[in-house]
Amino acid sequence: MPNERSPAKPLPPSYVPPNGTAYTVKDGDDWYSVARDHQRDVYALIYFNFQTLMPEEVNWYLKRNVGCNVTKDGQNWAFSSRLKPGKIYIPPTSYIFDPTVITTKPPLRIDWASALNYPHGGVHKTQFVLEVVDAVIIGLEIAEVAGVLAIAAPFVGAAVVVLIIGNAHADAIAKLKKDQMMDGYSLGIVLGVNGARPVYVKNNFFKHFPVHNAVYPEQGKSLQNAYNQAMVAGYATGRKLNNVQIVNLLGDLHARMGGDDVVIQKYGKGVSDAKKWSEGAKQRYYRDAASAFKIAHLR
């Protein structure tokens, strides 16, 4: 059976979003194909219908409000023909999915870390790839539960940036935000697994001012928040890894950086004696390791 959970304050069974256009689902449809065929963003389409992006709540509405009764993967209800009422609603072209942050609370999990659970001999490269938006959602849930980097709360709250803007420049702005999230999450992971103190992270790596962009100057604060929220998410996840996972992840990153010998030569004093690195060398190492993580493991 698909995973379901009733929202705290459910919409009525007959809820029709204001100004929505009814669409009858059919065999072969899914959220992505419907969004594509109507030139809408998939997350905006889901949120417009159910006022949530939580998978368990979306499944609950699909069964109760749409009448879904088949599943293709065993975890999520699927669209099909002959459902009753079998309708979802297409948002108008003027629909702007705002605010740009949505508070979400997914289950606490670090699925990708399972790739790091087993000891590896010698130089190795760990194989996993993360969707950055999912990784940030998970990481912020961990941060909220664990209370790590609480000093960063004024920047973060309990929200995740959603890459949806309702205008003609959506793709360009979404890419800018995704780039900030990838940079922040990668650096947060490296800082977390290396045990950097929260105040050190905030003082040396947070973005304390809006990100300048000549084409979209109004997006500066949003880009800043995207970066800082993603960094907190990465840091929180990095802090939750166990010793075997940390050793394997750092081994993976050093292999991608040219190996331990190259790392020792580049930053000085040896990997095992990083406390004696200069502050400049330490920060270069964090950023270079984050770049290796981003290239290898985020998309």
Image (cartoon, rainbow, N blue to C red):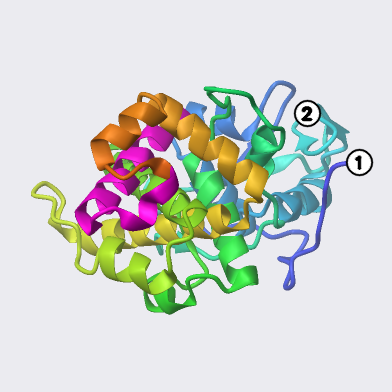
Taking the magenta stretch, the answer to whether it contains residue 296 is: yes
Query: What residue span does the magenta drawing correspond to?
Result: 272-299
Above or below, 14 relative to 183: below
Q: How far, Cα to Cα, is label 1 from label 2? A: 16 Å
Earlier residue among tags 1 and 2: 1
Image height check: is 152 above or below 287? below
In the rendered structure, find residue 80 and report the number of the disc placed on it. 2
- The residue located at (64%, 56%) in the rendering is 50
Q: In terms of image quadrants, where is residue 208? A: bottom left
State yes or no: residue 288 in magenta.
Answer: yes
**Count of labels shown?**
2
**Residue 160 in picture, x, y percent from top left:** 48, 59
Choose between 153 and 244: the one closer to the eye. Answer: 244
Q: Which residue is mark 1?
A: 1
Which three-letter amino acid code belongs to the residue tagged 2?
Ser
Q: Tell me the kind of residue under disc 1.
A: Met
Please tell me in which quadrant of the rendered image residue 268 appears. top left
Secondary structure of the residue carrying tag 2 is loop
Q: Residues within 10 Å of mark 1 (few under 14, many from 20)?
A: few
